[in-house]
Image: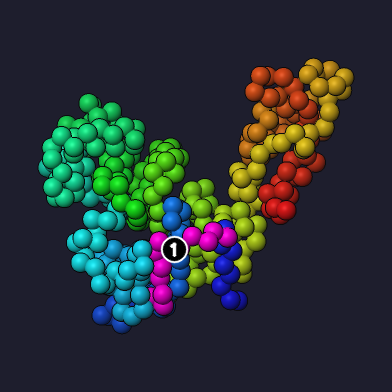
Amino acid sequence: MAPTTDSDSSTAEPLIRFRAARKEFASGAVAVEGLDLDVLPHELLALVGPSGCGKSTTLRMVNRLVEPSSGQVLLEGEDVMSVDAVALRRRIGYVIQHVGLFPHRTVTQNVTTVPRLLGWDKRRAAARVEELLDLVGLDPATYGRRYPHELSGGERQRVGVARALAVDPPVLLMDEPFGAVDPEGRRRLQVEFRRIQQTLGTTVMLVTHDIDEAVSLADRVVVLSRGGVVEQVADPVTLLARPANAFVEQFIGTGRETRLLGFGRVERRDLEAVDGGFGLVKDGAAAGSVALGASLDDALAALSGAGPAGVTVVDDGGAVVGRLTADGLLAALRRVTSPS
Ligand SMILES: Nc1ncnc2c1ncn2[C@@H]1O[C@H](COP(=O)(O)OP(=O)(O)OP(=O)(O)O)[C@@H](O)[C@H]1O
């Protein structure tokens, strides 16, 4: 089946553009056959696909850690091969799984490496470290003087992100950045990272083999098959609701509907009136309650413990605004899967 592109209709000029970009290694292995892909300004684009499909190679062609054999990679309209590689890499943040902090340098020294190379004076660099450590949730007074071996995996990863953001690069490349962090810390880091990315407006290409990470973080997800072949480019809901072909469907795996629940919210239109009108629950059958605006997976969890009368729904002030039943939940889910 032909690749499907469901772009979010942005008309912005791409910040990164792959044009028939191909990589054949000296061994003869063709990692990427000829990729056409646009990355839009300020978006978080996730690359997913099975092991060996060419995700890392694609990413590394942007900062020239891998040089395309043919075709082009353009950054802000400029062929990366025509830019000095060192200067190019200073414009592009790069975060990898084992973050590669310098072991004999403190957190502060690690974060200020590139600013110092760029000739920033000490005071400006120090101010930037404070700002960045705050941003990634590490207290500068506590962590600035520590060495990498005195940090947890998650803390090291945060320092890696701070270091990559030090000179406020327009582009951040991330290769399995949260891979080495335990599941709970990972979720927290993901959420915080997304907030930081949206605050700064950084354009991010994120490589992950974890479809859940991709759909929960990205604006658009690119599913690749072997040879860097684009099987689908879509926003997460479209990807989950309408996989372009059997490959994508199989890659996403089971539980698509459950994942979609996370994208929907309980709205007033899904509710039934409670007996005796709004504001007071007279119908004692409705057990438990859920907040208006709660995600549909939270609503499902509440509903699973309730009878057919469903659960009461309360607003911010705690007033009962209606009752959610399985029918209401289904209606809300349909809205997610088939947006009007
Ligand atoms: N330096 C290299 N020399 C030769 N072949 C390579 C080299 N780097 C990668 N490859 C091959 O290119 C293909 C794509 O590799 P790549 O690392 O881009 O895949 P990936 O999708 O990132 O994989 P993973 O999810 O396992 O990290 C693989 O078949 C790999 O063996």
The magenta segment is: 9-21
- The foreground one among 338 and 258 is 338
**Residue 10 among those drawn in magenta:** yes
Q: Is residue 140 visible?
A: yes
- The residue type indicated by label 1 comes to Pro
Q: Residue at x 24, y 68 (%)?
A: 83
**Residue 33 among those drawn in magenta:** no
Q: Which residue reaches farthest bottom?
A: 28
- The foreground one among 165 and 229 is 165
Give above or below for 339 relative to 158.
below
Q: Residue at x 40, y 57 (%)?
A: 205
Task: Give coordinates of residue 79: x percent, y percent.
Answer: 31, 71
Give above or below for 129 relative to 7.
above
Quarter occupied by residue 196 = top left
Q: Secondary structure at mark 1?
A: loop
Task: Give coordinates of residue 331: x percent, y percent.
Answer: 77, 45
Determine which residue is flagged by label 1. Answer: 14
Task: Answer yes or no: disc 1 within 8 Å of ligand 1.
Answer: no
Q: Is residue 249 visible?
A: no
- The foreground one among 196 and 50 is 196
Quarter occupied by residue 296 = top right
Task: Give coordinates of residue 311: x percent, y percent.
Answer: 75, 28
Q: Residue at x 46, y 69 (%)?
A: 37
**From the image, which quarter does the N terminus lie in?**
bottom right
Mark 1 is surrounded, within 10 Å at the Cα level, by few (under 14), some (14 to 19) or many (20 or more) other residues, namely some
Q: Residue at x 19, y 46 (%)?
A: 115
Give above or below for 37 relative to 177.
below
Count how many numbered circles sit on residues in the image.
1
Q: Which residue reaches farthest right?
A: 276
